[in-house]
Amino acid sequence: MAMGRDKTGVLLTGILIGGLIGAVLALLYAPTSGKRLRRDIARKAEEFADDVENIYHDGKEKAFEWIKEGKKKAASVVEDAKNIFKSST
């Protein structure tokens, strides 16, 4: 399951970087004035930073959920092992 999470992270990173590159290229090739172009690039960079921050926080929440779930499963496995050991002695 961890391998699937790695692939998802790589995919999301690729999408974000590709989107940023596409947005910057679209702005650079659009017929606008320099002042407006700089403003548009700054706005897109701010939007990108917000998107990255949201993804970071969502990922952090998911990681804490997975850790919590993993601890519960580990405790269950330990309890099962103790019960098996007790019943075998």
Image (tube, helix red, strand yellow):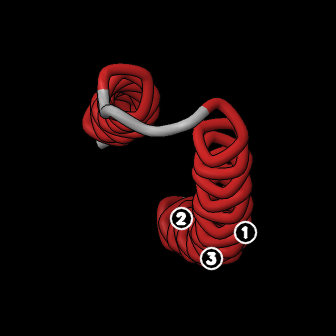
Task: Name the mark nearer the viewer: 3 or 1.
Answer: 1
As displayed, is residue 17 above or below residue 76?
above
Residue marked by disc 2 = 77
Characterize the local packing of mark 2: few (<14), some (14-19) or many (20 or more) Cα atoms within 10 angstroms: few
| Amino acid type at image mark 1 | His
Dot 3 crowding, Cα within 10 Å, few <14, some 14–19, many 20+: few
User: Which residue matches tag 3?
Assistant: 65
Q: Is residue 25 visible?
A: yes
Q: CA distance from mark 2 to mark 1?
A: 30 Å
In-front residue for pair 22/3? 22
Residue 79 showing in the rendered view: no
For the point 41% across and 34% down, the residue is 27
Q: Position of residue 19 (x, y in %)?
A: 34, 37
Are dots 2 and 3 in contact, CB under 8 Å? no
Of 23 and 85, nearer the camera is: 23
The amino acid on which the numbered mark 2 sits, given as a three-letter code, is Val
What is the three-letter code of the residue carrying label 3?
A: Glu
Residue 17 as seen in the image, left or right of residue 42 = left
Residue in the picture at 72% in, 41% down: 35
**Residue carrying label 1:** 57
Label 3 to label 1: alpha-carbon separation: 12 Å
Q: Are marks 3 and 1 in contact (CB under 8 Å)?
A: no
Question: In this view of the protein, which residue sits in the foreground, 58 or 53?
Answer: 53
Q: Say which quadrant the C terminus sits in.
A: bottom right
Mark 2 or mark 1: whose residue is earlier in sequence = 1
